[in-house]
Amino acid sequence: MEPRSWDDDEQLLADLRDALREAGPVDAAVAAGQAAYSWRTIDEELALASLVFDSRLDAGLVTRADSAARELVFETGSVGIGVEVVDGDLLGHVSPAAAGEVHLVDAQGAVVGSAEVDEFGCFSMPLADGGPMRLRYRAGATDVVTEWIGRWD
Amino acid sequence: MHDDEPDDVAVLVSAAVGGDQTAWNRLVNRYAPLVLAVARQCRVEGPDRQDVVQTVWLRLIEHLCELREPRALPRWLVVTTRRECYRFTAGTRRTTTVDPVDLAQVAAAQGDADPDWNLLRDERRNALLAAFAELSDRQRELLFLLMAEPPLSYSEISERLGVSVGSIGPTRGRALERLRRSPAISGLLELAETQKPGA
């Protein structure tokens, strides 16, 4: 089937209508987008740990026996946070290892999980469900947030 | 009717970076259909689709100031949305290693009957939505009314927009011409031209 020509005004408008119809109602998406803006200033004040590895996307790069576990690695210039999701729990490790605390925060800013980070840099917490979440790690002068992850498990 | 005012996406992006929530809201309004359409093309529906869309906006906030070239925004949104969708769907499907940025692989992994045709259709729709997002608010408003179901008469449209009936035709023509001239669309049209048999 040949795509129809857009030289014709009627056809162009009809195809635009189809495209908008495929997108569907936008209200919820627009509301979520507008609310997201409140993170702008908060983000400016914190170091952002970028997602540098996601086993779900980068699985081709490693060979693993237990492919069920999701692994995520975040990094700033000076701090690394690695997380494994196993049976509904977040098992994490920060480097360099330093005792502190880590919180899981949802898109509304609510803390939905907290854990102590021990002197070896390890922590674990149950994974809360629902919606995009990010980790915030604090230890001494270090205060970083990870990129948002829409689905952790 | 000031339908040709330069109410550029670039201006909205830099205003949003500078702290203007209204500019951000207008960006979100304009690009929500594109993000939603891409998620649907990736077969992500319901609450998952809402989570994907929310994640894309949250990521855009983090990366908005790095988008030095606002022309890159639609492409960034498409790629980010596809990647987020893949995070949702990969866990629930048999995992095959694909590059989520490569549409052909995604389509093949999803078992599309005719991936080439679906890809072409999706690319064309996304290009249209990206181009539509770049029109001025007045032009967008007019085209929305012209696409209404059931159709509205020119006199109803003139009443709603507060413009003369005589100006609707020319404004419509200019809006559609601007759609065609947008880089997203003209790129596709050129590509189609080179792929015609005998070209």
Image: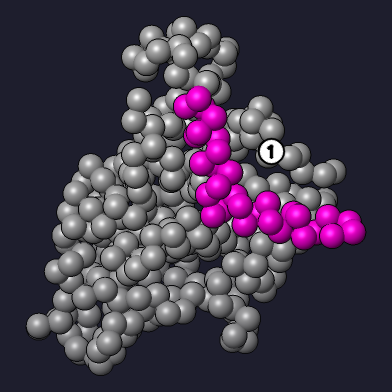
Q: Tell me, yes or no, if residue A140 can be seen here.
A: yes
Is B175 displayed left or right of B42 in the figure?
Answer: left
Q: Nearer the viewer, residue A3 or A114?
A: A3
Is B54 displayed left or right of B171 in the figure?
Answer: left
Give the image quarter of residue B163.
Answer: top left
The magenta region covers B170-199
Q: Residue type at mark 1: give it.
A: Asp
Could you tell me what secondary structure mostly forms the magenta stretch? Answer: helix
Q: Nearer the viewer, residue B130 or B196?
A: B196
Q: Residue at x 27, y 87 (%)?
A: A77
Q: Is residue B85 magenta?
A: no
Q: Which residue is mark 1?
A: A7
Q: Nearer the viewer, residue B10 or A120?
A: B10
Give percent across and percent down for residue B2. 34, 30
Considering the image in quadrants, where does the N terminus of chain A appear? top right
Give percent across and percent down for residue A118. 22, 84
Q: In this figure, which colouring scheme has been used for the structure? A: one colour
Q: Residue at x 44, y 49 (%)?
A: B53
Number of marks in the rendered image:
1
Q: Tell me, yes or no, if residue A112 can be seen here.
A: no
Give percent across and percent down for residue A84. 43, 76
Is A53 displayed left or right of B104 in the figure?
Answer: left
